[in-house]
Amino acid sequence: MIESPQNDRVKYWKKLQTSASHRRKEKLFLVEGWHLLEEANKHAFLKEVIYCGDENASKLPENVPAIKATKKVIEAISDTKTPQPVIGICGIKELPELSKISEHHLILDRIQDPGNIGTMIRSASAAGWGSVILGDGCADVYSPKVIRGTQGALFHLPLYQRPLIELINKLGEKDINIIGTDNTHEAADYRSCFLPSQSALVVGNEGSGISDEVRGLCDFFVRIPIHPRVESLSVATATSILLMHWSVI
């Protein structure tokens, strides 16, 4: 049993929780709580489990190594104020080439709020879309707040974190339609638009929208009409509306 938060392994796990570069280097990330642990194991991401409390031992997956620790160790690793008694260590899988995924793609341009990203990944999964692509300036997809926001949806579809310009150009070469989002009246009402069979929906930064460089690569733009008394929708809400309207399930 690991008893001290100063243990070297505990420090290593804590760094996985706090450092995006460390996660990428080690190809590992952490999940907290029973639901995420179950989802990670179901989709073969789970490599190891850290837990506290003898009463929880019988609930652990039988096929994954488990390490018992004290409550103080769990608290030292956890990203939440009131942590659950179980933390999973998950592997970052190698992703297929994007060109081999012939479904619909959600592209995030400089989305900074981890909660927004988590919600959009969850909505993309619910709508049956093929992948989510996070460009430069987005929060790290394996950060604790993004993971919690997905509620396990991050295990359901490929998540890419790539520079967007070259990537969008490659999608265009594959005859994939690039649909931008805008709130101006020049953009088409989304309710009147048919979703092409090969499409990528681009949503932009919470404050400034899609960057000019990415905007120049879009084939057309859509907007969501809203009542004049409301200034705008959050990017996560707007994206979820579009994804579910264009659900491919």
Image (cartoon, grey):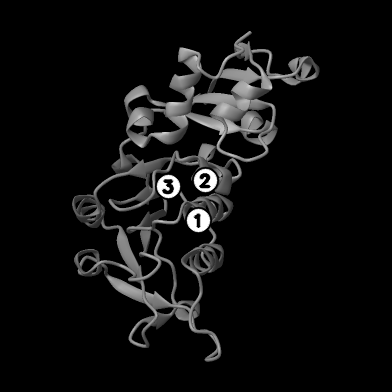
Q: Is residue 150 left or right of residue 169?
A: right
What residue is rendered at 45% in x and 48% in y?
Answer: 130
Q: Residues within 10 Å of mark 3 (few under 14, many from 20)?
A: many
Q: Residues within 10 Å of mark 2 (few under 14, many from 20)?
A: some
Residue 43 visible in this rendered orientation of the protein? no
- Say which residue label 2 marks: 145
Q: Residues within 10 Å of mark 1 (few under 14, many from 20)?
A: many
- Say which residue label 1 marks: 120
What residue is rendered at 55% in x and 51% in y?
Answer: 122
Depth check: give the residue in front, 122 or 126: 122
Q: Can you tell which of label 3 and label 2 is closer to the viewer?
A: 2
Question: From this viewpoint, which residue is outermost toward the right?
Answer: 55
Rendered view: 243 above or below 73: below
Please tell me the numbered disc located at residue 214.
none
How far is the residue under mark 3 from the one under mark 2?
A: 20 Å
Rendered view: 161 above or below 211: above
Residue 237 in picture, x, y percent from top left: 54, 67
Q: Callout 3, which amino acid? A: Ser
User: Mark 1 touching mark 2, by CB under 8 A?
Assistant: no
Q: Callout 1, which amino acid? A: Met
Residue 1 in picture, x, y percent from top left: 63, 8
How far is the residue under mark 3 from the one under mark 1?
A: 11 Å
The C terminus lies in quadrant: bottom right
SS of the residue under disc 3: strand
Of mark 3 and mark 2, the one earlier in the sequence is: 3
SS of the residue under disc 1: helix
Q: Is residue 109 left or right of residue 92?
A: left
- Say which residue label 3 marks: 131
Depth check: give the residue in front, 94 or 146: 146
What residue is rendered at 20% in x and 69% in y?
Answer: 216
